[in-house]
Amino acid sequence: MKLQSVESFTAGQRIGVVRVRAEDGSEGWGQFAPSNADITALVFHRQVAPVALGMEISDPPAVSRAVMAATYKFPGTYVCRALAGLDTAIWDLLGKAADKSVCELLGGRPRPFPVYGSSMRRDTTPGEEIARLQRLRDSYGYSGFKVKIGKRMGYDVDEWPGRTETLIRSARETLGADVTLLADGNSGFTPARAIEVGRLMEAYAFSHLEEPCPYWELEWTAEVAAALTIPVAGGEQDYDLKQWERMLAMQAVDICQPDICYLGGLSRTLQVAAMAQQAGLPCVPHSSNHSLVMVFTLHMMGALTNAGPHAEFSVEPQPTASGFYAPRLQAVDGKVQIPDGPGWGVTIDPDWLAQTERMVSQIELR
């Protein structure tokens, strides 16, 4: 089954989806990484599509390897973001051809999967944030939450003085001992400050400290991980498989968080999950929005033997990120159903497609 055509549909900078068609007319849908999707679409048709068209697609990892080899002069995030659209669409096509969900293709079982409520906000006071999480717990049954601490790329500057410490203490004291708590530093700390914050989190029984140091400073993160008993999580930004090998070899993280759309698709993310399993580590992919990356993540988590206890699920309103496919994902009793239809188990809204910018690359029929 060879790849006959690829199309991209972009809605401005935010969302870009991909449709692939095989020579027998079968088709599948995938998605680029969100943000700057319009730029990613150009890279897709210029660099990824010419390699993939005409290839046998029954082996998605082989297609990914071919694209990465052919684009070796451009080792960067945009090629991987574009490749993600192709790879995830091929997996959807293969699932539909087999009349199985992607989760089932991977050996898993679609089911309600536990999620933690992931806050994306630093503009709230600790009191406002905790009150919001309480309301969300009561409405959706979340048993765990992740909060934002420090300042993104802040190099030890808090969003405002004292917010981090107050939020850590008040989250545990207010939400109680039964709620799992996690915190994300978004590359905000030097090692000394990260260790200080991590020890406070240990005292208040938090479950993980995410991306405490600038993500490219692997030695800094490894220093933090070695000093703390609380697990250090990271890897969402890392799209180079060799970087993942280095990260795991130096024990920089205790929880692996690859992003399926940043890394280049499901095929490459499964490689990282396998590396993590060999290292004895859990995998909890980064999935901070409700676009199709959340759908991909749920299918993968439902099949991994080293899946963490829960998936990330944003608590923020996201009409742009979730309004283009159905059924929409929703937390019920702290779980989100892995879509159980063939492929990814979702359909793309034709009205949304009609408002997007379409580009196509194809093999001309003779």
Image: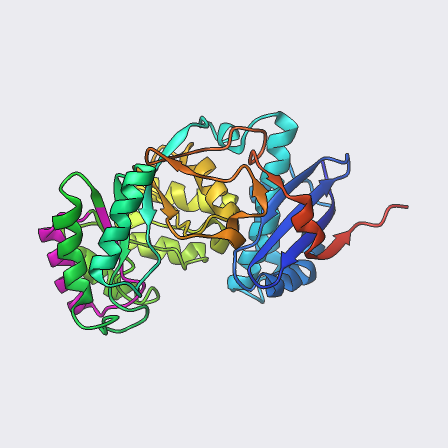
Give the residue drawn at x 33%, y 36%: 334
In the rendered image, residue 168 lying in the magenta stretch gets the answer: no
Q: What residue is at 27 percent from the left and 49 percent from the top?
A: 133
146 left or right of 177?
right
Of residue 140 and residue 212, the one placed in the foreground of this image is: 140
Residue at 62%, 58% (x, y): give it.
Answer: 11
Measured from the top left, where is residue 346 in percent x and y? Answer: 57, 37
Residue 200 vertical placement versus 29 (above, below): below
Please state the horizontal and vertical placement of residue 61, each as a whole percent of the image: 55, 43
What is the magenta range?
A: 181-206
Q: Nearer the viewer, residue 119 or 48?
A: 119
Residue occupying image coordinates x 14% and y 55%: 170
Q: Is residue 204 magenta?
A: yes
Q: Is residue 145 left or right of residue 200?
A: right
Q: Is residue 65 visible?
A: no
Residue lying at the far right in this picture: please name it: 366
